[in-house]
Amino acid sequence: MKHRGFTFEKLKIASFDFTCCEGCQLQLANRESTLIDFLELLDIKNFRELSSEQFDDYDIALIEGSISRQDEVERLQAIRRQAKTLVAFGSCACFGGVNSLKNKFSLKELVAEVYPGMKVETMPVKKISDVVKVDLSIPGCPVNKEEVERVMVNLATGSLVTLPKHPVCFECKAQLNTCLFELGEICLGPITRGGCNAVCTTGKTPCLGCRGPSEEINMPAFVELVKARELSLDDLQEKIAFYNAFEGFSNHEA
Amino acid sequence: MKRDYSLDIHHLTRVEGHANISITVKEGKLLDARWAVVETPRFFEVMVKGMSAERVPFLTSRICGICSISHALASIRALERAMKIEPPVVAETTRLLAMHGETLQSHALHLFFLVAPDFTGASSVLPLITSHPDLIKAGLRLKELGNEISTVSAGRCTHPVSLVVGGLSKAPEKQQLLQLRTMILESKPALDTACSFFRSLKIPEFKRETEFISLCNGSSYPSIGGSIISTDGVKQDENEYQLMTNEYMRDFSTSKFTRLSRESSVAGALARFNNNYDLLHPKAKEVAASFDLQAVCHNPFMNNIAQLIECVHILEDARELIDSLLDMELREIRTPYSPKAGSATGAVEAPRGILYHHMETSDEGKVVRADCVIPTTQNNANIGYDLGAIAEQALQEGKNDKEIEKLCEMVVRSYDPCISCSVH
């Protein structure tokens, strides 16, 4: 079929969800004005939330959510064996996401508080790449549908898939927003990968880093910035930990 | 004919989240009917412990991808009540509008993407794009409108950005509100298309008496806060939610169960309709009459129709909310506050029924204890009993295995279960 002048085969795609809110899958059905064209790109083989027909001959697997139980590990490994391209879809899949906040507590404490007296299986939250090889990551809480559309077109046409390298600040400034640091708030915009069109900061809410670190971040300088403005290091720590997206950038001071 | 029947569905499709259905009938007698949620628990109630109150709504909204606005607002309401914060009128009005957007989006997704295929013999919405193009266009139009209402009022439709403790971080822009108003007026034909389609369907005849629970404020169709009432005549204050839910666990399900006066009860669009019919917009009442739907209705399949009627109500009420926002100065949007120790419940009518968040704060404004009771949790027991009853009825009517399986799937879908949400 043809799309914007390109001839290509439809993408044989499947979508699977693990420990998550299913909000990223939901984005696939958003941007309704382009939805019917978007679906033209796809040959949906397996998408439990959408269809009762399920086939296992997919090439691309979108994986939403993080991993928190043994049966999920096995299900994910089986998908990995089938998929030519496995995509970590959304912040839970890419980084563990908000689910990782559970890892601060002991499993015993978690179960005892929520299911007192009941046996419930759970394990510390893992991101997808902790369990299987990930070919492509699309971060975001939720993912940005516009970006998903772009990536799918790239995959269909065999073009290189890239994510923006610049931080959220670029997109925030472009919208002429007042910097939240000027309003006395710690915002993770300077260290977070752009591509979200700065939706949170444009809504005057600080960035919590759902898209993970942008290229070449300088964490020590960022911590210095927070200190120089006499803002709370506890607040910084709470924000950095929110999506578990800055795991590799240990923040000794905060 | 007294025959044996068994049904075992692993990971039901076209619902949000993972759950199984199993039914066993021996010689015409029902032995067991089970609705088992197997979703992985996430432990949000523990995760919020020690977190600053201002951040908590951003975390709890992540309980659900479909009703994130309801979760954010349930937490915000609980925290504002716990810390004695009065949000400004602009914020209260904008929040009601955001709730409308979310419910419209959620109902449209359910009715057109998940339910319509059952009634047209399709396995998904995809074939309907070519077989029922006008219907799908109408559905997408309504869903898009819902998302647009949420985006204008909350900054983003999934995981809102501008709903904060104390009010709003940013007011909606009047230009955008005016555009929304036009969009709403232009969406009426889409709603008419949807109503004619659903009127043409044969809704399965099935009835099992149960108790319907919803919020009630006496002056408007319920949305944010109010008393909790039931069709069996129970009434409680919002803070006494535990007396309405009586939550309990079963070892086959990671989602909990609730009950009140009977063995099970129901929350959701039909529960709101049954308890608050008088407060619906006259146009919504007209549509209800065209479906012959009257309170109190005990057919769970009519929850689909109640959702459609709510869409009619939402379009009318959203326009009125927009008009009142257009008349206001959108300057005072956030009440400053100092952290305080306290505890309170925030109850909202999420698309699928009452959502309770109970929050306890410390003097430093950190959350020290949280409890969330999800609408689907309140429907789990009733879904189980309905499955048994509908299988028995279908067997008596001489339906074949395939027909019974389809009816069972359809009755579960009519509750619009939000499974991952119910295992938070």
Image (spheres, rainbow, N blue to C red):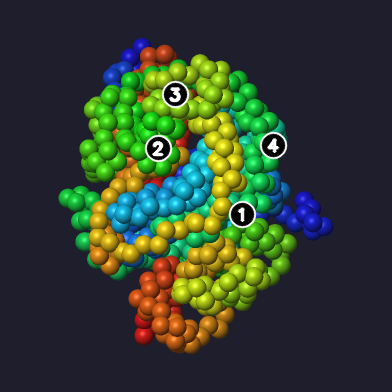
Amino acid marked by disc 1: Glu
Residue B387 disc label:
none
Mark 2–mark 3 CB contact (< 8 Å): no
Q: Residue tagged by mark 1? A: B173
The residue positioned 34% from the left and 28% from the top of the image is: B212
* 3D distance between C-alphas at marks 3 and 1: 33 Å
* 3D distance between C-alphas at marks 4 and 3: 27 Å
Q: Nearer the viewer, residue B254 or B335?
A: B335
Question: Are tags 1 and 4 found on a single chain?
Answer: yes
Amino acid marked by disc 3: Asp
B367 shown above or below B71:
below
Residue B353 disc label:
2
The answer to whether B414 appears left or right of B38 in the picture is right
Q: Nearer the viewer, mark 4 or mark 2?
A: 4
* 3D distance between C-alphas at marks 4 and 2: 28 Å
Q: Residue tagged by mark 4? A: B186
* 3D distance between C-alphas at marks 2 and 3: 18 Å
- Of marks 3 and 1, which one's residue comes earlier in the chain? 1
Question: Are tags 4 and 2 found on a single chain?
Answer: yes
